[in-house]
Amino acid sequence: MFIETILQGKRILVTGGGSGLGKEMASEYARLGAQVFICGRRESVLNDTVEEITAAGGIAKALVCDIRAAGAVDDMIDKIWLDGGALTGLVNNAAGNFISPTKDLSTNGFDAISNIVFKGSFYVTHACGKRWIEEKTKASVISILTTWVWNGGPYTVPSAMSKAGINIMTKSLAAEWGKYGIRLNAISPGPFPTKGAWDRLNPDQGTDEDLGNSSIPMGRNGYMSELRNLATFLMADGCEYLTGQNIAIDGAAHLASGGNFYQSLDSLSDEDWSGIKEMIKSSNEVDKSNRSN
């Protein structure tokens, strides 16, 4: 869809870039000529992704960083700036999410999501933005949101609240930072199944991207190539007047059925929720083990 040098000379950071949607976007950016930086908490996962990107001829570097800590974020951005100069792009992709009746949420459970999505996304955006403004560098920021920012997310309230906050950050800073040549936009994907997300949002379902869905007018889940193409369009030059927008890519699901989990989860029994909780717990334990390796 794009010429293979469309991102030549770009330096792009993708948070949570070691797996899932972040890996897809980082790999595509590198294929199209950008120098890519990926960050996350699982060093082995990050290194595996960097190896894949470099084996395919791309340029990528991994940085272990917990974006929940503002100081760690600032240190990471300093390292990137010292390693070749300013970034030209940022993708706020790092996230956490799980399904749960809100009445059963603990404060720790709420913080586990909001500290990454809400605070972490702001910390990284702010750390990059203040440097861009000081150095008079034009840049593009993309935040990965959900369609729940428009109509709510029953049973995923911490994520819905946090993503809604980043949606407002996107609009606010698009206006505030427009004079500096800094663009901020967002993408709200519908179902693009990845193992990490689906283990916590649909723990009893597979991740077959061709799985039809009656709640989606187009009758299918999204293809990763479609997401990669939109992320490339927003990061590339040529449409700099586009800023402050949140673009849904969901086959019109949120227009037809809300695009959230209400219909599929509202009728579950306490026994059903207990089983789901155990599946999510098991997935979390695997992630913790990977971070310690």
Image: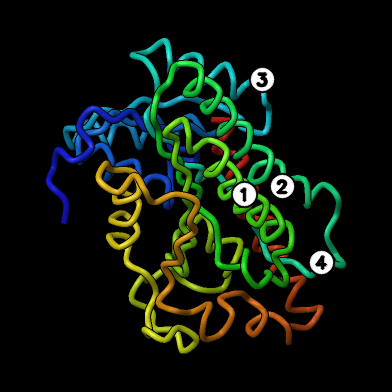
* Residue type highlighted by circle 4: Thr
Of tags 1 and 3, the one toward the viewer is: 1
Q: Nearer the viewer, residue 212 or 51?
A: 212
Q: Earlier in the sequence, mark 3 or mark 2?
A: 3
Numbered disc 2: secondary structure: helix
Q: Residue at x 74, y 66 (%)?
A: 100
Q: Earlier in the sequence, mark 4 or mark 2?
A: 4
Rounded to the nearest angstrom, the CA distance separating label 4 from label 1 is 21 Å
Query: How many numbered marks are there?
Result: 4
The residue indicated by pointer 2 is 114
Callout 4 environment at 10 Å: few (<14), some (14 to 19), or many (20+)?
few
Q: Earlier in the sequence, mark 1 or mark 3?
A: 3
* Residue type highlighted by circle 1: Ile
| 193 shown above or below 69 | below
| Quadrant of the drawing holding the C terminus | top right
Of tags 4 and 2, the one toward the viewer is: 2
Q: Earlier in the sequence, mark 2 or mark 1?
A: 2
The residue indicated by pointer 3 is 71
Rounded to the nearest angstrom, the CA distance separating label 1 from label 3 is 20 Å
The residue indicated by pointer 4 is 102
Q: Earlier in the sequence, mark 4 or mark 1?
A: 4
| Quadrant of the drawing holding the N terminus | bottom left
Residue 166 got which mark? Answer: 1
Q: Residue at x 33, y 14 (%)?
A: 84
Callout 3 environment at 10 Å: few (<14), some (14 to 19), or many (20+)?
few
